[in-house]
Amino acid sequence: QSALTQPASVSGSPGQSITIPCTGTSGDVGSNNYVSWYQQHPGEAPKLMIYDVSSRPSGISNRFSGSKSGNTASLTISGLRTEDEADYYCNSYTTTSTWVFGGGTKLTVL
Amino acid sequence: EVQLLESGGGLVQPGGSLRLSCASSGFTFVSYGMIWVRQAPGKGLEWVSAITGGGGRTYYADSVKGRFTISRDNSKNTLYLQMNSLRAEDTAMYYCAKDLLGWPFYFGSWGQGTLVTVSS
């Protein structure tokens, strides 16, 4: 159950778009379309932003989008806002009926 | 409105035990899978365990298998995590989460967490 690989940090300016990659293996990301993304602000509980690779829960802005190719999933945030500054975690269901998170990416909005 | 309230955290010595609870309201508890996720201080999220709505199936991370037991009391709308043989590396904020919509589980709603500290 090795963690999925994410960059430690990414940054962007307000209004720009950024993409956070999440690389796994054929045992997790590459084996299904059960990838999700979570946003966590400091001192708060995480919040589900994307599920089923690219679906948004009710109330989540369409500025957030997800995609997947092979063993790598990606979260794209368009029209960056200062409130998007947070930690982002990917997650995948695995072939061994477990779940695995990525190490997390700190997004800085400059 | 979904509400999840964790309790039971605290300071425990290595090798000790603790039982966490997650009191739930605002939804039909028996209809949803429930999950525990933890976060060590300053670190990332780690999935710990999950249980189906009826309680018939349970799942564990390798790091806790054989030491932790997840359970639920659907008559009390409460999720539990029994933690035995605790180690320093189990020190973390423990969050309970409600599945979003079915199988496999997505962590759709979260509580605010309860802090577990394992130290002598």
Image (cartoon, coloured by chain):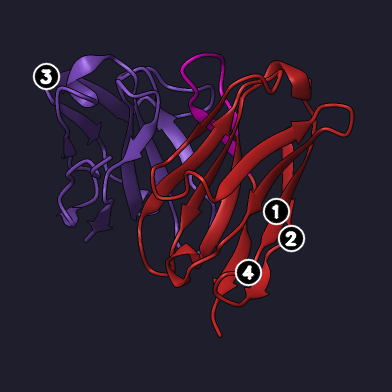
Name, please, the residue furthest toward the left: A70
Answer few, some or many: residues within 10 Å of disc 3's Cα (few below 14, many 20 plus, some between 14 and 19): few
Looking at the picture, does residue A13 appear above or below residue A21?
below
- The lab-note entry on whether marks 3 and 1 share a chain reads no
Magenta stretch, residue numbers? B98-110
Q: How crowded is mark 4: few (under 14 residues within 10 Å), some or many (20 or more)?
A: some
- Residue B17 sits in which quadrant? bottom right
Q: Where is residue B115 in the image (x, y as percent from the top left)?
A: 61, 66
Q: Would you name the residue on which mark 1 appears?
A: B20
Q: Is residue B66 above or below residue B112?
A: above
Identify residue for label 3: A69
SS for dot 3: strand
Q: What whole-number distance in Å separates the C-alpha atoms at marks 2 and 3?
A: 42 Å
Name, please, the residue furthest toward the right: B75
CA distance separating discs 4 and 3: 44 Å
Same chain for marks 2 and 3? no
Residue occupied by mark 4 = B16
Say whether marks 2 and 1 touch (CB < 8 Å).
Answer: yes
Chain that is coloured purple in the picture:
A
Q: Name the residue under label 2.
A: B8
